[in-house]
Amino acid sequence: MSDLPAFLLEDDGGGEHSFPGTRPALICFIKEDCPTCNDVMPLIEALHQELGAAADFFVVGQTAEGNRVLTERHGLTVPLLNDESLKVSFAYDVEIVPTLHLVDAQGRSSRKLMGFARDEWRQAAGVFAEALSLGPPAVHWADYPEWRPGCGSRSADPLIADRLRAESENSPLRARRIEVGAGDDEAELMFDLGFSDGLPLVPPTPERVLRMLAGTGRDAQEVVATVAPNMGEATVEKVAINAVMAGCRPEYLPVVIACLEAVCTDAFNIHGVMATTMGASPVIVVNGPVRERLGMNMKLGALGQGSRANATIGRALRLAIRNIGGAQPGGTERSTLGNPMKFTMCFPEWEERNPWTSLHVERGFAAGDSVVTAFAMSSGPTLIVDQDARGGDQLAGSFGLCLDSIFHPRAHFATETLLVIAPEHVDTFARDGYGKAEIRARIQAVTARSIQELAADEVSAVGFKPAVIEAMDEQALARKLPKFRRDEDIHIVVAGAEAGKFSGAFHGWVTGEIGSMPVSKIIEEA
Amino acid sequence: MTTILDPTDERVPVERRVTPRSGRIAGNVAFLDISKPKGNVLLDRLEALLKAQAPGIQVNRYAKPTFAKPAPSDLRAQIAKDNDFVVEALAD
């Protein structure tokens, strides 16, 4: 039983050569543009003439044209076998040419040599001849260089190797393969097949998906989430395909997986977030050391375009929900207006610029953990402009006034907010000893309105209805309600450029058990 | 030729068969309120109209815990088990 892979290759004349046979064999991988291979071709020819009657010779070339050139250049009679597909070279894990295998009659490898070292080849040829009951081959060894390094095998070229790995029998890929016709454009085809969010996609070729999978240590077929509304099974491979299309680098994949794990929970309720006519979307905040490793942008323009990691991680999440979960506009995605966050919205917190507790620590994780937190937000970031406040009371007061309009100024206890406080505003708060608790309390204080003030009237029909108001006594009508049901519904992170007294607020969706709650997940890095 | 990998869950949607229509309403009719405001107003009015036209029917009322999430599977099973027809009040 051979311990080497079997193969069937053709020579230039169409003759078939199969391994293993019944005789001892010499297998040698070569390529035409390798100087060392050219040095040893006369030697292989000489060995073939000496030993070819008693042993099989498989001289495997890596291009058909190269084989023709070598045969002519060196006047060879030994047939060169065509491995232009490189599948045999790949199966033999050839890294260097020439690589020589000497094989016994049972097909077992007795010797493997890489590159050329004259004494080694001489000794190996002698042993091989002896096993054939022949004397040492009559080769004029002095004609050959003492030592030559080999050249890289074409099958080890990174681009080609990824393709060969994808096509090999133990490829981790199981997804359906879609052949793009010669006259078809893959970018257009992906639009036509409904894979796109409306922007061009990177074609998820098997090579690219394999490279993406290298970003995680998890098995390609592990199911990481069940994605509503179709309850599609998101395997690591399927997430990787969508991450390729979004433009991610392999090291982003663990973050994308954590995002999907976070939103595909009953607490986050991605089904409702996608289906609602209000038009909510996941907003992802990244915390921990992974931010620096991926080069995420937490500073100037953190919530905008320009950072590949920020942009493509958020986009990969949305594409996965669209393609694996089937949430497509007009289908189960029913947003009246939609919003640009539905393309992507992911940014890291600038923890080092945050004088308070960072988001993930506040939510129970260690500072050294890398964590994603998903929020369901219906709009944002809307700007909070205050260039005048010199203290925490006034600045948090401005925050409250701006937040009062979320949904509707009379909509109290209805939703939550994610505040992104810019460094200059952070400094104003910090100078005044303002922490997160003080900011939250001040926002609740300045937004508190009596039920009487929140009643529907001739200006707007939104608010407590007349029948409800009429049933209340004076004391009940005077009861004040802050904007948010709980202080914790005001989530606070720090990001943005050093310059500019402009903070941002994301406006929430339906909060709590009946809608969506923020969910954090640890990022399991490879 | 370029090969790309399918990014979807690769499931072919199962076509649900619509129950044959008998042309008449009888037996138990489920009214499912999805818990959006005023769904009950719509269903109350519909119940009155339906009972006037099909006097023998029994209307059973159900409600989803929240409009924002799919109906729990137990509730769906209960409705299917106890009823011949379903009316769902979708929105406000």
Image: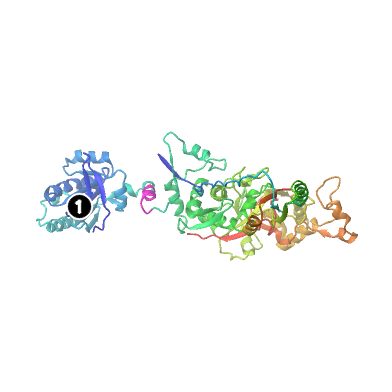
Q: Estimate the x, y position of residue A347 in percent, counting from the top left.
A: 60, 52
Q: Quadrant of residue B73?
A: bottom right
Q: Quadrant of the N terminus of chain A?
A: bottom left
Q: Estimate the x, y position of residue A277 in percent, counting from the top left.
A: 68, 46
Q: Estimate the x, y position of residue A63 in percent, counting from the top left.
A: 28, 42
Q: From this viewpoint, is residue A17 visible?
A: yes
Determine which residue is flagged by label 1. Answer: A21
Helix, strand or loop status at disc 1: loop
Tell me which secondary structure the magenta stretch mostly adopts. Answer: helix
User: Can you name the residue that lies furthest to the front here?
Assistant: B56
User: Can you name the residue that lies furthest to the top here?
Assistant: A183
Label 1: how many residues lie within 10 Å, few (<14), some (14-19) or many (20+)? some
Magenta range is A161-170
Q: Estimate the x, y position of residue A515 in percent, counting from the top left.
A: 68, 55
Q: From this viewpoint, is residue A497 visible?
A: no
| Magenta highlight on residue A297 | no
Residue A175 or residue B85, whichever sits in front: B85
Q: Is residue A398 left or right of residue A320?
A: right
User: Can you name the residue that lies furthest to the right here?
Assistant: A474
Residue B13 or residue A369, whichever sits in front: B13
Q: Amino acid at mark 1?
A: Gly
Chain under label 1? A
Q: Quadrant of residue A130?
A: bottom left
